[in-house]
Structure formats: C-alpha cells, structure tokens
Amino acid sequence: MGIESLKKEASKLSRLEKLDFLQYIANLLAEEENVPLIEEHKSIILTRQQEVRKGEVKTIPASNVKSDLMKKYGLHD
C-alpha cells in the first residue's frame, strides 16, 4: 500500500482513530535506531533536561495532557 492509499484510508477514520494512528506512527519513528538529531534539537533537549532537573519548570503528566486534548477535541476513550 502506498502513501496516497494510506492518506485516503486515514481520512476515513474517526478523530479518535486518527489520534491512535498518529501515536502508532510516532512510536514507529521513535523505535527506529540511529535517527540523528540536528544540533538545534539536541540543544533544546539538553536545555529542557537541565530546567527540569533544577526545578525551574513544572512538568505535566502525559495522562493529564492526553485527557485535556481528549476534552478539547471532543474525543472519548
């Protein structure tokens, strides 16, 4: 199946199914080994890590972010 077929089929999905599919694709990308980061991304990641470790920022649990997005877009589990 080609990318255009995938796009066509994806457009038929419900919002929740599209989010699930998006998460699936994101996980696939995350699992790939040796994916190089550009220097700008490395810098941002290191800065954020330092901010979290120093207590300079308040983190938000992923479950809260997901719940907020589900409510915002009228989605249900």
Image (cartoon, rainbow, N blue to C red):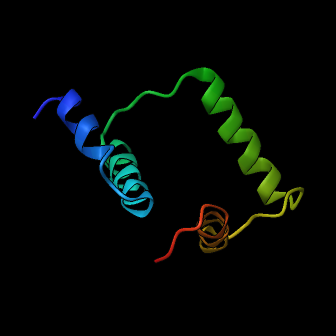
Q: Quadrant of the N terminus?
A: top left
Residue 36: quadrant of the picture: top left
Percent coordinates x, y for residue 45 in the rendering: 66, 40
Q: Residue at x 41, y 55 (%)?
A: 23
Camera-side residue of 72 and 33 = 72
In the rendered view, tell whether residue 67 sits above or below residue 49: below
For this view, does 59 lie left or right of residue 35? right
For this view, does 67 lie left or right of residue 76? right
Residue furthest top as drawn: 39
Task: Count how many numbered circles sit on residues in the image.
Answer: 0
For this view, does 21 lie left or right of residue 62? left
Residue 56: quadrant of the picture: bottom right
Residue furthest bottom as drawn: 77
In the rendered view, tell whether residue 19 sits above or below residue 35: below
Percent coordinates x, y for residue 8 in the rendering: 25, 37
In the rendered view, tell whether residue 59 sits above or below residue 47: below
Residue furthest front as drawn: 12
Residue furthest right as drawn: 56
Q: Residue at x 30, y 45 (%)?
A: 10
Q: Residue at x 71, y 50 (%)?
A: 49
For this view, does 10 lie left or right of residue 30? left
Percent coordinates x, y for residue 29 in the rendering: 35, 42
